[in-house]
Amino acid sequence: MLVFSGKAKPRTASLPACRFLRLLPLNAHEEVAVKAASTLALLALLGMATVLQAQPALAPPQPATATAEHPLLVLNQASRAIYAQSRARALAEAKPVIILMGDRLILDTGEKRLEASFASRPYDDLKTFAHIGLALDTALMGLPEDGRLSDELVEQLLQYKALIQAAASEISNLDLNEDQAARQHKIATAAIAFINRLADQRQCTSAQRQAFIRSLTPLVMANVAEAAEATLETIDGVVQQWKRELSPEQWQRLRVIVMGRQLPRKDSLAVQYFAWLLNVPGEGERIIYAEGIPDEEGALKLLGTHLIDTQVGIDFFDDPARMRRDLLGDAARETLKRWSEKR
């Protein structure tokens, strides 16, 4: 369905869509009715209903306004409703599907729904100590050119140092091997010494901040590597168990929705894992990254949209991926190119 809208899905060469009603001429009676309905709606929104009641020359608004009854608007609403029905039908036939949401995995086969957590203690612990460098780096950004620290910032850093010391005292109680434990001690010790130096000198230039952070980078990235492996092992353990419960035909039809934020989308751990598992290049027909969608219902709705738009792309353009970018994008590019040649 060729729906011109301003929603978030098309991100390449995005351009706000035109409102067709505004481009079509109305006859005199229609124009008066539309203007009257628009005026009533605006005044009501501004809390001026009492003003309307004080004007005997104006009739009270009818339940169905002239705008709502306009044939073009009714037609467009019907077109969108047909699209929504087709999407729901396609989604009902699209299962099984695995949804990754936060630290949870959901398997929906259409007949049953299974859910499991892939949170792992080593991952959380390693991530916590890796975040120390991130916190100090961001706390010291944006200082005056001379790097002078305010009393408030020094106090905040000393309070943060106390938190690091408390966490470091628990390292021996964590489920970490000898190398991992030693690494967390190194991160904590370096951070504490750095904060002490800042508190004494009351100054930190950009070069000093970056030098300290770079000294932590190898330790942090070692944590990152081990956290990634621990997460992958946990996810794979769940998925392999579910695979045994699916028939070969179901497994071949399996689709995956990875729900996440915008910035981790490129090289997403979960997308890489499922691409490896399903032997596909990455995001596409079987793997969908649901960016900024907060719940399972929205993720499934996005899957239905992908299924319908894939066939629409084939039917209109002989390109299954055409509707994954802004339909107005090509025309916008050509228009802007013409403008550049004229200006």
Image (cartoon, rainbow, N blue to C red):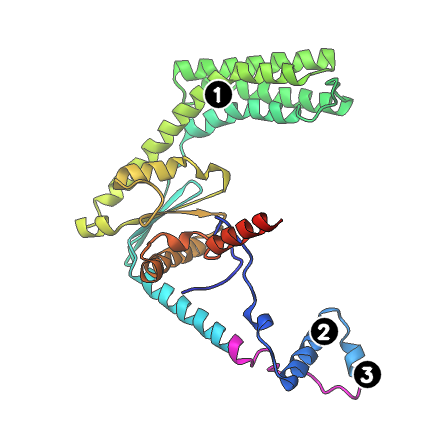
Disc 1 from disc 3: Cα separation: 70 Å
The correct choice, above or below, for 3 with respect to 201 in the image is below
Query: Disc number at residue 44?
Result: 2
Residue at 34% in and 32% down? 232
The amino acid pointed to by label 2 is Ala
Q: Position of residue 78 (x, y in %)?
A: 45, 74
By secondary structure, the bulk of the magenta-drawn segment is best described as: loop
Q: Quadrant of the N terminus?
A: bottom left
Q: Is residue 63 magenta?
A: yes
Query: Disc number at residue 54?
Result: 3
Residue at 53% in and 75% down? 73
Tell which of 94 and 168 is nearer to you. 94
Which residue has dot 1 on it?
220
Magenta residues (range): 55-73
Left or right of 181: which side holds 240?
A: left
Left or right of 200: which side holds 122?
A: left
Q: Earlier in the sequence, mark 1 or mark 3?
A: 3
